[in-house]
Amino acid sequence: METLQPSQHPVDPQNSVNEPKRLRASEGVSWFTDSWRIFSKNKFKWMGAIILISLIPIAVGFLFGLLGLESPPADFNDFTSPIIIRELLFNLFFYWVGFCFLGGFVLLTAQTAQGKNFNFGSLFAGFSIKKSGAFLILLLLGILVCLPVVILFSIFATGNFLRADFMPAFPILFVILLVFIAIYSMMFWLTPAFIMLEDMKPVAAIKASFNACRRNIPALLVYGLIWLGIGIAFWFIFMIVMVSAFATEASMQQATALSGPFFILFFIFLVITYLVLYPVAMIGIYTAYRSIFPQGRLNKY
């Protein structure tokens, strides 16, 4: 994968932004294979990075719990307005931490793809004052975009939509949900790369991400189908484990005796999968960005 190079000639400021390339549908496969290649060169370090960014929020949450700052009421009726606000703020905090780590992950990917040493410190680059502020705004914008759909589904949920007269609305709601997920993904997928690598503002990053994805829907569909296929494959593996644990034995006692080892092995399998597929998926943000913008979105001059 080529490194970003500054422009060799002066560029008119009006033309300082590179337009996203229109790629073939097969580039969706390249996004995945390039991500896998980047991961495989430092696979154990990438796994360590995932463990690190997963354990830190868990440790912070555990610390909050010890201090009595995070202890949701056991009874739903005990939720008061201050408690609800506190829970919302805690969730907002942890999502913000995740966004900042994602930005650092993209930066680390760019560095390793350009031949630089693997630096775990880059994972924390998203927590700088400027970047963390941008990711907070990005998170709030993401919540704002979700609100209309959440309100729509809440109306149906509180209206006993399981009644027969509501059944015709299910296909419509399903289509609305799919369209929303597609648009939302296009708006926010490449934003971490634009914020971390191009120093763009959140709103500009959202516009650039949507425009880049809009011009490459065939490649995006292929890339999505690859991950869908992986998800279906793991669903089948899960079902096989369940059947093997409970349905192949002559008695329930034997099945119960064997279910422990099966589930332990399956848990180990899931952990290993998480440590492999999760970083590959996040690396894919960078590989797609570099494929659509080989010279970067902003001309360097």
Image: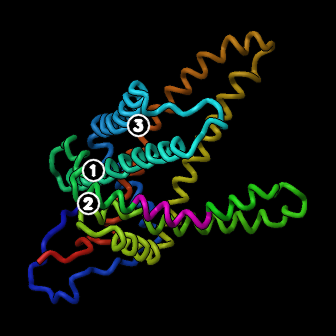
- Which amino acid, mark 2? Met
Q: Quadrant of residue 147?
A: bottom right
Q: How many marks?
A: 3
Task: Give the residue number, with chain letter if any, for mark 1.
Answer: 104
Residue at position x 43%, y 73% in the image: 210
Left or right for 231, reference 53 = right
Q: Magenta region: which residues?
A: 139-149
Q: Nearer the viewer, residue 249 or 69?
A: 69
* 137 sits to left or right of 179: left
For the residue pair 175 and 274, the one nearer the viewer reads as 175
> The residue under label 3 is which amino acid type?
Leu
Residue 286's place in the image compared with 258, above or below, is below
Res. 221 mark? none
Question: Closer to the camera: disc 3 or disc 2?
Answer: 2
Please report the residue visible at 29 percent of the width from the left and 58 percent of the height from the top: 133
Residue at numbered disc 2: 196
Q: CA distance from mark 1 to mark 3?
A: 17 Å
Q: Are marks 1 and 2 in contact (CB under 8 Å)?
A: yes
Q: Quadrant of residue 4?
A: bottom left
Instruction: Check contact, mark 1 vs mark 3: CB within 8 A.
Output: no
Examine the rendering and report whether any part of residue 287 can be seen.
no
